[in-house]
Image (spheres, grey):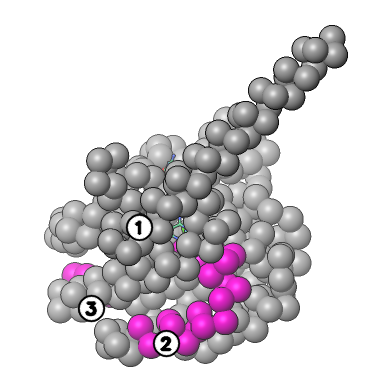
Amino acid sequence: AKEAGRNDFRFFTQEMNAEAHEQMVLEREIRKAIKKEEFVVYYQPVVDVKQGRIVSCEALVRWQHPFKGLVAPNYFIAIAEETGLIDGIGHLVLKQVCQQIQKWQNDPVMKDIRVAVNLSPHQLRNNNLVHDIEKMLQYYGISAGALAFEITETQVMQDPEGTAVLLDDIQALGIKIYLDDFGTGYSSLNYLKRFSFDVLKIDRSFIMDVEVDSGDAALVEAIIVMAHKLGIKVVAEGVETENQRQFVAQQECDLIQGFYYSRPIDAEEMSSFCHLNFAK
Ligand code: C2E
Ligand code: CA
Ligand code: CA
Ligand code: CA
């Protein structure tokens, strides 16, 4: 038994070493990818329920890998966050988004489409963040209203005081703040009152089951009512079916994002999609 135990332990460490090694390789690859600017931004349309048209979109990063193809963020965001490389990726994302907004300003259909960019905890801890954002807006000559940032309640929880100051500074620039993945963290209600979020995004996990889980349906309904009482707009995330769309629309949800309308698409497809939608 002793022998086996020792073997187990050896296997365990070997596995850990393999994993640590894999992480190291990935970290090095990401570092290189930042230098070579291999990250591209995809956009997922967000539809205004009352207006029945696309009013905004979420910027979602992908890694255009030289031989792996288009790599999803789940593969690299966590390690980028751990290693701080997310600052570099975040900078590239913001730059691309601002360039895109600048281009879209000359297009009557695209010029009022707001782009929401995800900010990670590490980026929020970066003291230069607000300054970087301000410089970027100036450089590309775009108005702050064209941009929004999404942060999660878990991030807010990690440092409520610091986050409050930071969010105030960002909002003072005229940029809206969205609370992402709402309902998946803790103390949600408390933070809703303390922070002045412009928009709340109900997490996909609640939307997924609204048709079959009366508990989730009740929660979604309650979140929307509460947000509206606090003067906050609501996005339903991850709407995939007509029934889900109908349900959240009936609950007077303001905005809808999900595969029902479109998956995340590149800038060109986004523009075509909006023109099609606008022409209707
Ligand atoms: P998120 O911020 O919650 O983004 C929404 C995710 O849900 C996206 O996955 C989107 O493709 C997916 N989604 C949207 N509608 C549907 C639907 O109807 N059904 C299903 N099954 N999924 C839907 P994606 O693009 O893979 O991004 C995953 C996560 O990676 C994001 O979750 C966000 O946390 C992170 N991420 C993406 N881009 C960035 C970025 O530029 N910076 C940072 N810091 N994080 C990012
Ligand atoms: Ca998001
Ligand atoms: Ca989300
Ligand atoms: Ca459920």
Residue 169, placed above or below residue 147:
below
Nearest the eye: 101 or 89: 89
Residue visible at 17% across and 58% down in the picture: 268
Residue visible at 64% across and 72% down in the picture: 230
Nearest the eye: 253 or 140: 140
Q: x, y (%) of residue 272?
A: 15, 57
**Quarter of the picture holding the C terminus:** bottom left
Q: Which residue is tagged 3?
A: 102
Residue 58 left/right relative to 23 = left
Residue 153 left/right relative to 260 = right
Q: Residue furthest top?
A: 1
In the rendered structure, does residue 113 fall within the stretch colored magenta? yes
* Mark 3 residue type: Gln
**Quarter of the picture holding the N terminus:** top right
Label 2 near ligand 1 (CB < 8 Å): no
* Mark 1 residue type: Lys
Q: Which residue is tagged 2?
A: 134
In the rendered structure, does residue 280 fall within the stretch colored magenta? no
Mark 2 → mark 3, Cα distance in angstroms: 15 Å
Magenta-colored span: 108-136
Q: Nearer the viewer, mark 2 or mark 3?
A: 2
Question: Going from the N terminus, do you reach mark 3 or mark 1 first?
Answer: 1
Q: x, y (%) of residue 65?
A: 29, 47
Residue visible at 34% across and 52% down in the picture: 62
Q: Residue furthest right?
A: 2
Residue 192 left/right relative to 47 = right
